[in-house]
Image (spheres, grey):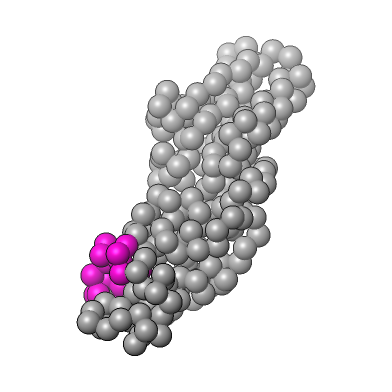
Amino acid sequence: MLNVVTGKDLKKIKQESSQIADRFLKLNKNSTLENHTGDTLNPTDLEYRAVATSLFGDLKVFIIEDFIQEYTDEFLKIVDAIGASKNLFVFYEESVIKDVEKAITGAGGSFVKLDAPEKAKENPFAITDALIARDKKKLWQLYRQEIDRGESAESIMGRFVWAIKTLVLIQKNPKDTAVTLGISPFVYSKTKSAGKAWTLNDAENFYTNMLFGMKPGDEMEHHLEKLILG
């Protein structure tokens, strides 16, 4: 059995995970609980626990913190075994990518998505700042925050297009000023400084892949995930 709890508030997702485990423990009187993290449990050990059966028929509950993001590829290989297990596995994470979410539901798993804190709504340009700075970790976190609170991937891509077009314009015209390029002086200064993390070729390739690289049948949310993590 597989349950995944995601959210930005660590206290809330831990409480929700504990409640899921408690319900199982009450229904299965002889079951026992183990707590783990990605540091105390590796994929081989996890797979063994998923397929193992007790001689006495007692079941186990495993609450596991930050495993899926640490071992994404390995988790995808054993997710079906976890979903089919008679033991209960409760993972709690800040977020998971679309491929993982699909694999979990395909394996019969359940999701609990808790709301992001209100402070995630403060700055709609923080995500483009992270993009131009090529801060992959921050960009991914901000992307998941926006998606989880209901922002469309299409809306986010619109801001990405604007940010990269601005960057390319500045890089192609290094001697021009903000006024001659028709860009806000603040945006010009910020983009020119942070944009040193990009070559012109990298920026143009990213722009092309963003607009024309989505595979048939793919979803925009998944398409942007691959660009961000690529």
- Residue 134 in view, yes or no: yes
Residue 161 lies, in percent from the top left, at 45, 75
Residue at 48%, 50% (x, y): give it: 141
Total number of numbered discs in the rendering: 0
Residue at 45%, 70% (x, y): give it: 160
Residue at 63%, 15% (x, y): give it: 32
Locate the N terminus by quadrant. Answer: top right
Up-down: is 66 above or below 228?
A: above
Q: Classify residue 128 as left or right of residue 190.
A: right
Place residue 27 in its image quadrant. top right
Q: Does the magenta stretch include residue 202?
A: yes
Place residue 91 in its image quadrant. top right
Q: Does the magenta stretch include residue 53?
A: no
Most extreme residue toward the right, as rendered?
A: 27
Up-down: is 75 above or below 222?
A: above
The residues colored magenta run: 191-204
Residue at 61%, 66% (x, y): give it: 152
